[in-house]
Image: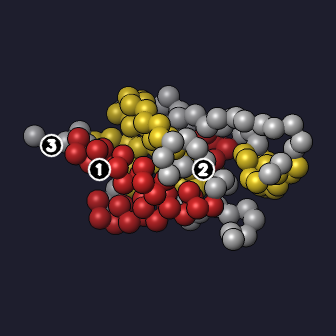
Amino acid sequence: MPSPQVEIVVIALGTPLLVGIYREGKLTQKIVSRDKTSEALPRIFEDILKKYSIKRVYYAKGPGSFMAIKLAYIFLKSLQIVKNFELYGCEGFVFNENRPIKAVGNLYFVKENDKIVTKKIDNPIDWDFQLPKKLDNLNCSLDTAPLYVIPAV
């Protein structure tokens, strides 16, 4: 009996790491991990691959934690080569209603006139990322390269 085909959304821009499993475009399972991306992603995908066949993966390619973005990209790109699924990159703003995304200190990534910039915001902002309930109209592309707004260190 063949494994059911699913689509996956991965948001690894900070803590917690979010992974959504979608059947017929609808969220059926949400996985939340506070572990390091390097430890959580392989464990989560090992479990997913035991139960499902992956048709497509959407991942938040940035902006956010550079290390988490790099790890997610390398992991998912390698898995894509081995398992032959479609991989799409999405701006992190897709998953937080276009709100500022924490950079470092009191700097946040914001989107202004279709350009991502950093801005100082003195009052702490803590907007969580959310997995979409449905994959309809998810604004993503085949450009999966990590999105670095400021140079990686």
* The label number, if any, that marks residue 60 in the structure image: none
Q: Residue at x 81, y 38 (%)?
A: 124
- The answer to which quarter of the image holds residue 26 is top left
Q: Which residue is mark 1?
A: 46
Q: Which residue is mark 2?
A: 13
Q: In this rendering, would 115 be left or right of 82? A: right
Residue 130 horizontal/vertical position (percent): 58, 34
Which of 45 and 16 lies nearest the eye of the viewer?
16
Which of 114 and 58 lies nearest the eye of the viewer?
58
Q: Nearer the viewer, mark 1 or mark 3?
A: 1
Point out the tag, 2 or 1, that comes first from the N-terminus. 2
Colouring convention used in this rendered image of the protein: secondary structure
Three-letter amino acid code at the position of disc 1: Glu
Point out the tag, 1 or 3, that comes first from the N-terminus. 3
- Cα separation, mark 2 vs mark 3, equals 33 Å
Query: Which secondary structure lies at badge 2?
Result: loop
Label 3: few (<14), some (14–19) or many (≥20) C-alpha neighbours in 10 Å:
few
Which of 110 and 151 lies nearest the eye of the viewer?
151
- The answer to which quarter of the image holds residue 118 is bottom right
Furthest-left residue in view? 1
- Cα separation, mark 1 vs mark 3, equals 17 Å
Point out the image quarter for the N terminus: top left
Point out the image quarter for the C terminus: bottom right
- Mark 3 and mark 1 in contact (Cβ < 8 Å)? no
Q: Residue at x 19, y 42 (%)?
A: 3
Point out the tag, 2 or 3, that comes first from the N-terminus. 3
Q: Which residue is mark 3?
A: 2
- Cα separation, mark 2 vs mark 1, equals 21 Å
- Mark 3 and mark 2 in contact (Cβ < 8 Å)? no
Q: Taking the image as drawn, is residue 114 in sight? A: no
Which of 107 and 83 lies nearest the eye of the viewer?
107
Three-letter amino acid code at the position of disc 3: Pro
